[in-house]
Amino acid sequence: MKILFILLTLTHSIFAQNILSKPQETNNFEIKKDYKLFYIQVGTFRNMKYATIVFDHLEEMNYPLRLKEKQIGLYNYFKLFIGPYRTKEEAYLIKDSLPSQYTDSFVLTDNN
């Protein structure tokens, strides 16, 4: 039993040294994001309560939603987005299919 334990310990030790002693490979290139994602901004709210009401309404319709808080001066604003979408055309199709109370919504990229 002792011999088995010693053998397993040595095997583990040798295996660990081989893994740890291998030089780490590095990639000398930078990954660039060459695509944009598109969102539909449905509203900007100063009151989280109202943002939540609209969020819940759109969530019932199974839209992918994001709620971002942004401080401007002394005030916090809550921006509500639908998305992301891979193409501008897809975002506009969704925007145009929204209920009439969201006609003021607009499409923007994730760079904004």
Image (cartoon, rainbow, N blue to C red):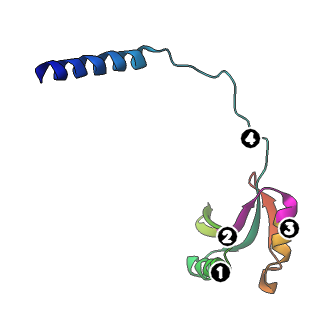
Which residue occupies the foreground of this view, 111 or 8?
Answer: 8
Q: Residue at (63%, 69%) from the top-left corner?
A: 77
The percent position of residue 48, horizontal first and vertical second, equals 57, 76
C-alpha separation, residue under disc 1 versus residue under disc 3: 20 Å
Q: Is residue 11 left or right of residue 69?
A: left
Callout 4 amino acid:
Lys
- The part of the chain drawn in magenta is 79-90
Q: What type is the residue that disc 1 sits on?
A: Val
Label of residue 67 in the image: none
Sequence-wise, which precedes: disc 3 or disc 4? 4
Name the residue tied to disc 2: 80
- The quarter of the displayed image where residue 79 is located: bottom right
**Which residue is label 3 attached to?**
92
> Label 2 is placed on what type of residue?
Leu
Which of pointers 1 and 2 lies earlier in the amino acid sequence?
1
Q: Are marks 3 and 2 in contact (CB under 8 Å)?
A: no
Q: Residues within 10 Å of mark 3 (few under 14, many from 20)?
A: some
SS label for mark 2? strand
